[in-house]
Amino acid sequence: MDAFDTFTRDLKKLPAEEQDKIIEEKKKSCICATCPSYNKCAIVEREKLFCMIGQSFLCISYEEGCKCEDCPVAKEYGLKYNYFCTRGDVKFQRYMIDALN
């Protein structure tokens, strides 16, 4: 089990309000807003932390560059995928990679 799996397992054990607090804290170190794919709609809707929450359903539909590999959250959990805003969170991308192999 890697650091991300451990984090999500432990997070699920907490009450919903505690989970929300932790997610909001993670959003503070998120660099999504500096990414070329991040747009005005995402700013208004306050979309962030795609690596954990999942892709943007409202705002980001084009890949114009990616900074996921530079993100402190991605580094903290050893995430090796990118374009979480358009391709989905870590779990989804892992699933899709395994399904294709």
Image (spheres, helix red, strand yellow):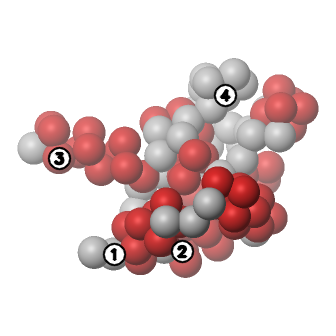
Q: Is residue 79 above or below residue 16?
A: below
Alpha carbon distance from label 2 to label 4: 23 Å
Q: Which residue is mark 3?
A: 98
Q: Give the class, few, some or many, for how many residues have Cα within 10 Å of label 2's Cα (few <14, many ≥20).
A: few
Amino acid type, residue under disc 3 in the picture: Asp
* Front of the two marks 3 and 4: 3
Pointer 3 with pointer 1, Cβ within 8 A: no
Q: Residue furthest front?
A: 15
Q: Which residue is mark 2?
A: 75
User: Which one is earlier in the sequence, the residue at label 2 or at label 4?
Assistant: 4
Image coords of residue 35 (percent x, y): 72, 49
Image coords of residue 8 (percent x, y): 46, 64
User: Which one is earlier in the sequence, the residue at label 4 or at label 1?
Assistant: 1
User: Which one is earlier in the sequence, the residue at label 2 or at label 1?
Assistant: 1
Q: Which residue is mark 4?
A: 60
Amino acid type, residue under disc 1 in the picture: Asp
Amino acid type, residue under disc 2 in the picture: Lys
Pointer 3 with pointer 4, Cβ within 8 A: no
Q: Which residue is mark 1?
A: 2
Alpha carbon distance from label 3 to label 1: 16 Å
Which residue is located at x 35 percent, y 45 percent? Answer: 93
Q: Is residue 1 above or below residue 54?
A: below
